[in-house]
Image: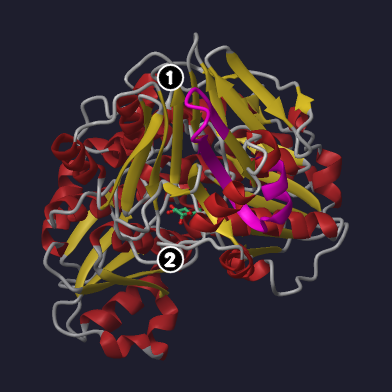
Amino acid sequence: MCGIVGYLGKRDCTEVLMDGLEKLEYRGYDSAGIAVFENGSIKTVKTRGKLSCMREKLSKEGSPKGFCGIGHTRWATHGEPSDINSHPHSNGRVTIVHNGIIENYTELKAFLTEKGYTFVSQTDSEVAACLLDYYYSERNPLKAITETMKELEGSFALGILFKDFPDRVYAVRKQSPLIVGEGEGEYFIASDIPAFLKYTKNYVLLEDNEIVCMKSSGTSYFDVHGIPIKKEKQVAEWDVEQAQKCGFPHFMLKEIHEQPDVVNKTLEDIVKDGVPDFSERGISDELLKNVGRVFIVACGTAMHAGIIAKYAIEKLARVPVTVEVASEFRYMEPIVGENDLVILISQSGETADTKAGLELAKEKGAKTLAVVNVKYSAIARAADMCIHTLAGPEIAVASTKAYMVQITVMYLLAFRFAFARGKISLEELKKLTEELMLSPKAISDVIERKGECQFIASRLVNVEKLFFIGRGFDYALSLEGSLKLKEITYIHSEAYAAGELKHGTISLIEDNIPVITVATQENILAKTISNMEEVKARGAYIIALCRKGTEFSENTVDLRFDIDTELPDMLVPLPTVCALQLIAYYTSVLRGNDPDKPRNLAKSVTTE
Ligand code: G6P
């Protein structure tokens, strides 16, 4: 989604803004722009395309020279990606950048048109600039903002410059993330910490309907009525190195390599005296014992982590678990009650649909638990209980390490659930935990064999479509492997429960179509092998991800990647998904794509 930056200080503002926008590139965007006060007037440069196009334009047209400004990367919602639709937008005396969606923009546009305003772009954002100008009649920025806030519906974060105040940046937010960086005599606004981490680790979280005014003398905060409020400073735990590539060609590859370490950290954080302990997070055995049903609500990769969790919790704790796509859950009148536990899984903690799912669950009186990577994010703060996953900043759009720690946490929760409900003894709980402790090594072993994944990728580089199949945990992995592959390679890929393929989709199997089969689960291996043979008989090219030593009949498998680990079947998804991530990564690179910036995608989806 869109990225916002703003700066006020003594450095070259254009450079700070461009640098910040580069750090937010991971959010996904199709155009960019900046507006900087230069000798008292605002100079705006914006363009469709990547930041490299912006750099080119800046060198052609000249970089604005100044110390105060705002910048933006746009992920188009209203109006195609174009120079005109790019932010910043100006109207009258106000220049803004906007992230989010103004839902009542049609009504507001009609009202403002009647008042004599004209519009140049197709965006909803320009309406916010006009409305601010309309309420700026007394040349009072704070009043203009508070009046505008009363009218705007939807979600938004705004960075605002007022023409008459060349030494101030204002910002406000409602349901879209925005933070304020507080350095030594310099101040920042940004959609995410990496944008200013290089300059300061101190930041303030703007809550919904709060306003900040940055001046060279410092920052002031106000509520929606314009009344001054005090804000607490936070210190970012992430360091600059974590937000840089550190010699890796892409963030995605770096993040895949970080997985053994972040899984280790997660285990160290949760395991106490050899068993998972969630009591500090308010998740008592009593609570787990009395839960009626579990709902897991999430989107994308996080939802796939939820499917692994479902299989683990149901298998061990014998509690019914339903996994719901958040955008469906929120509108399908779910039957959720006070006795139920709704678990929200989210890397960013800001995903609009997941957040709405959380609000709905709370309305229905259910207990809510957030499993979230970004501390203090909206979902983390709003849920009754929170498990903070320790993946560190995930920059690549395609989620890897966040998924890995999500499933680690969910396994630990499944173990504790089973113990709390008397389904396993303390010894069994310890044994399962000990086994999970072996997973960082198993993941490392797969990473060391990345050359083999690269070789598999070389077979996929020119295909137009392919399939993933598996059963049980392997099906959950197939879904994630397929999503990873399609999002960064643009190859049409579908994942099926292996037994389901013959009910229609098998008609698509032709000579040489790759079918990536995940076959790691001993209890259903024979069944999966039958499904492999069915597709092989129709000409498929079979790539198997299986445990070392798995035997297939002659000529069934064309290529294989053996998972060589002592982990029990239930935990084999941890190393196996790593192989799937590497296959997707290398296929993307071999096809000449940039895996860190897949087309049309955004890292944090703050719209419905
Ligand atoms: C976007 C990202 C996905 C992610 C999904 C959910 O679509 O591109 O990688 O899985 O959002 O995000 P969340 O932050 O809630 O985990």
Is residue 90 shown left or right of residue 599?
Answer: right
Image coords of residue 415 (percent x, y): 66, 43
The answer to if 161 sits in the magenta stretch is: yes
Sequence-wise, the earlier of marks 1 and 2 is: 2
Classify 335 as above or below 561. Answer: below
Q: Amino acid at mark 1?
A: Asp
Q: Nearer the viewer, residue 301 or 479?
A: 301
| Circle 2 crowding by C-alpha within 10 Å: few under 14, some 14–19, many from 20 | some
Image coords of residue 546 (percent x, y): 32, 57
Q: Residue at x 61, y 19 (%)?
A: 219
Q: Residue at x 33, y 39 (%)?
A: 256
Is residue 62 shown left or right of residue 414?
Answer: left
Q: Secondary structure at mark 1?
A: loop
Q: Quadrant location of residue 534?
A: bottom left
Q: Amino acid at mark 2?
A: Gln
Reading the image, the residue beneath label 1 is 239
Is residue 50 shown left or right of residue 60?
Answer: right
The C terminus: image quadrant: bottom right
Q: Nearer the viewer, residue 100 or 556?
A: 100
Reading the image, the residue beneath label 2 is 122
Classify 383 as above or below 584. Answer: above
Image coords of residue 599 (percent x, y): 29, 58
Regarding residue 560, the answer to whether it shows in the image is yes
| Circle 1 crowding by C-alpha within 10 Å: few under 14, some 14–19, many from 20 | some
Classify 166 as above or below 304. Answer: above
Q: Residue at x 29, y 24 (%)?
A: 65
Looking at the image, the residue that sits furthest to the top is 184
Please state the extent of the stretch shown in magenta in the rendering: 145-170
Q: Residue at x 19, y 42 (%)?
A: 57
Q: Quadrant location of residue 490?
A: bottom left
The answer to if 404 sits in the magenta stretch is: no
